[in-house]
Structures are given as C-alpha cells and as structure tokens.
Image: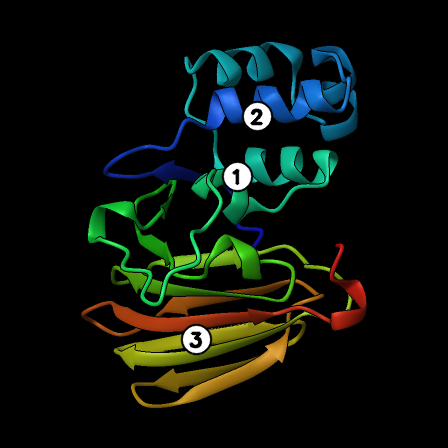
Amino acid sequence: MTLREPVIGLNEPPAIGPRLQAERKARNLTLAELALASGVSRSMLSEIERGDANPTYGTLWHLTRALGLDMSSLLSGAKEEARAIDHQTEHSIPMIRSADGTCTLHILSPASMVSITEWYLLSFEPGGRLMSEPHAHGTLEHLHCTEGEILVRCGGSETRLRAGETARYAADIEHGLVSIGPSGAKAFLVVAFDPAKRTR
C-alpha cells in the first residue's frame, strides 16, 4: 500500500537502516544517487541508515521503489523457512501506524507473496482514515469490514461498508478508507496485483 505519512511501529523493530544500507551498496549507489532517485534527502537517508530516524511509510515507499524492493521483505528482512506450520507470534508481525495515530495495519502476508498479493488487518479509531496513492496498473483491493462502518472512496465514487460486507475496487487510482461509525472499525484488506506487473 502507499499511504500518506504513516510511521513504522513494531514491538520488536526490524533493523531497517542496516538492511536499507546493504541494499543500496549492493546496487553500487551512493547516498546522493539514492536521494536523487527516491526524492528523499541525503541527510534523511543517512539518519535512517544509522538508525537515528524512524522513517514514515511514505518515505520507505519511495525508497523501496527506487531500489526495486517490496515493503514487506524489507520489514521482515529474513528468508522464510520452509516449515509445515509457520507460527508467527503477535510481536513478530509488522505493524504500520498512521502519523495521527488513528489507524493501524498489521502486515499478515509473508514476504514471498508481496509481488502477487498482500493482506492486512486494519484497525480504525473513530474518524480514522487511510488515503492511498495509486498502486501499479491493474491492482485491485478487496476490503472486508468485520466491525463498525467504513466509507470506501475510489476515484469519484464512494460506498458505505458495514460489518460483514465486502467492497472490491480499483487501486491503481487514488482511493481511501474512512471510519464513520461511533466506535471505530476493523477490516481485512487484500491487495491483489496484476500478474503481468509482478515485478512492479
């Protein structure tokens, strides 16, 4: 997803800075070159790599696109073991929190699936919102509301989603979700990418 201004928050934060630095160096890019390609300032890049700055989701989105990476693999950072049951504890699941604190997204999809599909558990406070920039061409989102009510906006259209209802909509245009119930809302979100665009 490409949300505006979220920050990364984990109970056990991943070492994003060193991983980002390793990926940059593997591509023989200087800080200045990556700054130019991503639109993120050189000073901010340096702080992130040293672990002195906590990057927003928007910042990481621009950096991963510039490096040809996916967000989930950068956050998970490790190859997944081939096991009969891959048990993920609560504290090992990455969580994205919006800058205003009104919405959180738990990243439930494994890193190996990010070029095909991603799925999230969303939790909104009353009035919480997620406004997303367009994803790659052909991307679709499937939102299933489990609690409360969510207003789904896509292009010039909008619909009200109640608990137990599902909305499917194009995600390659601007779209957004707003909690409109008095008690907030919860939902599962699946992002499905066009198979022809798997390299994104």
193 left or right of 98?
right
Mark 1 — residue?
Answer: 74
Q: Under tag 1, what secondary structure?
A: helix
Q: Pinpoint residue 50: horizontal percent, then vertical percent.
A: 47, 11
Kind of residue at badge 3: Leu
Quadrant in the rendering for residue 135: bottom right
Mark 2 — residue?
Answer: 20
Which disc is residue 163 wearing?
none
**Cβ–Cβ under 8 Å for marks 1 and 2:** yes
125 left or right of 21?
left
* Residue farthest along the left direction in this orientation: 183
Depth check, mark 3 against mark 2: the one in front is 2
Q: Residue at x 65, y 17 (%)?
A: 41
Kind of residue at badge 1: Leu
Q: Earlier in the sequence, mark 3 or mark 1?
A: 1
Q: Earlier in the sequence, mark 3 or mark 2?
A: 2
- Distance from Cα at disc 3 to Cα at disc 2: 35 Å
Q: Residue at x 29, y 70 (%)?
A: 186
Q: Pinpoint residue 168: horizontal percent, then vertical percent.
A: 56, 83
Which disc is residue 151 wearing?
3
* Residue farthest along the bottom direction in this orientation: 164
Depth check, mark 3 against mark 1: the one in front is 1
How many residues crowd around disc 3 within 10 Å: few (fewer than 14), some, or many (20 or more)?
some
Q: Residue at x 43, y 75 (%)?
A: 151
Kind of residue at badge 2: Leu
